[in-house]
Image: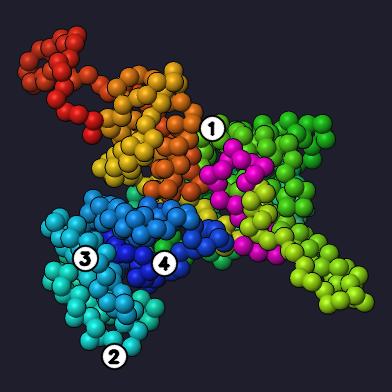
Amino acid sequence: MSGSIAIVGRPNVGKSALFNRIVGRRIAIVHDEPGVTRDRISAEAEWRGHSFTLVDTGGIGLLRREKSEDVITRAALDQAALALESAQVIIMVTNAQEGLAPLDEEVALRLRQSGKPVLVAANKVDHPGLEAAVGEFAELGFERVFPVSAIHGTGVKELMDAAVALLPQAQKAAEPVSAAASGAAPLKLAIVGRPNVGKSSLVNALTRSSRVIVSPIPGTTRDSVDVPFEVEADGVRQSYVLIDTAGIRKTRQVSTDIEFYSVKRAEESITRCDIAVLVLDAEAGILEQDKKIAARIVEAGKACVVVVNKWDLVADAVRRAQVEEMARRKDKDRPRQKRLITLSEFGEWVQELLFFLDYAPVIFTSARSGFHLDRLLEAVRYVADQLRQQIPTSLLNRVLREALERRPAVGEDGRFLKFFYATQVGQTPPTFLLFFNRDETLAEPCRKFLQREMRRAFGYEGCPIHLAARARPKPVAPVRTGDRPQPRKQKSGPRRRGPL
Ligand code: GDP
């Protein structure tokens, strides 16, 4: 196992730019909308032969539109907590152009208390004249301050040499790190959707893309159903298995059977996959059958990316309508601004119709022109990363506790539940066990509320979040080795410990 380095700091100091600079590639954000919640992003990275996990805590706790000072402070502190739990070495990023800010000091205080090695990266030193300004960051109380410019790449080498030297048993990487090499099993993708939406075309377009390496496995024949493939970007490889590709090959079906087979086929693939890529046809819109397949994905509790394919046709139609409109208005006043259907409006419409699948990002593609195929790969990678995250227990409990302080938990019986603690019991899909004072299922609005709060804190874009409620286990009498098992006490004594 290689170690992990976390990047923390208040908003806008350039954490993501530094992250991208170190990892050596751009991490695309799936949405077009500015200010979307971004969760912790981590990448297997390598620096001068040392491999490690780089964690960008950038988006933790930042709510979609709410950016009050309060929220920003809490977010920065949450990031610090997360970094402390998950990393051996911490890079605290500050903004040399703005100087020391009170929030820097607060973050530093938390980091100092931990005793973990912290390096300060005074970022945005974009020209030598700014280096003098770096001195004041020594006040943060850490031994070393590095002037860097994430944009220009200056100073990053010195910073990273120092960072990897601090990793425990710094490991030499033999070759570019791949997801397989880091021990993670490849995630299984299923491309599902009704006939003619463009599934085969997408698979073909993707497998021809220069970023996708389809592994030739022995015995691969035309009947092969599962196709392992890797996506490579700047030396980092991510492995996946595309399942059931035979099923999406065009078959001549009797028309009455088409619906039955396509839904049935989709169902089987959905059961086997980790991430379902639901393909829709932009021109045809959303039909009943699309909704049925979407519902299966939700019922099966699978991560999902929604793809609106054939976007080229819609774009064409919009352009044609625009030209006609202009022609009609030719003799009249100057044409007013014509309202165009934008990607985000269309996306909202898709999310409205597939409201029960609200956790999935929506990507617009054209298998024909190749439009946004890279986005699709990024979205899959993004969701895969979200799916792999293990939330530190203390952070999980803090988020839930804060949420339940604002709005206490309610059971299906309509009575309040007292929360004790929670723990993550599964990653694919993310599953959490919450312990309360009584054994009672959570009321639906309460479950929804908690899921929303968890998304705010941890992102989990594209992933369902499963919450199970249980009564807190009764304390068990300790059993010493060699002793015969003691019968369990029937009644537990009064517990001194209050709710966590
Ligand atoms: P499948 O049944 O879902 O696998 O759909 P196909 O991949 O066979 O595609 C059905 C039809 O839509 C074919 O005629 C494709 O050429 C066409 N098609 C697929 N993707 C696109 C696209 O992005 N744009 C356009 N204009 N046509 C597409």
Residue that appears at 40% across and 20% down: 415
Q: Secondary structure at mark 2?
A: helix
Answer with mark 2 or mark 1, whichever residue precedes in sequence: 2
Q: Which residue is mark 2?
A: 129
Q: In the rendering, at what x and y percent does residue 183 appear?
A: 34, 49
Q: Nearer the viewer, mark 2 or mark 1?
A: 2
**CA gap, disc 1 to disc 3?**
46 Å
Q: Amino acid at mark 4?
A: Gly
The answer to whether 13 appears left or right of 474 in the picture is right
Answer with mark 1 or mark 3, whichever residue precedes in sequence: 3
> Start and end of the magenta stretch?
351-372
Are circles 4 and 1 on residues that touch, CB within 8 Å? no
Q: Is residue 80 above or below residue 140?
A: above
Are circles 2 and 3 on residues that touch, CB within 8 Å? no
Q: Nearer the viewer, residue 437 or 299?
A: 437
**CA gap, disc 4 to disc 1?**
34 Å
- The color scheme shown is rainbow
Q: In the rendering, at what x and y percent does residue 273 appear?
A: 52, 39
Q: Which residue is mark 3?
A: 105
Answer with mark 4 or mark 1, whichever residue precedes in sequence: 4
- Give me the disc on residue 300: 1
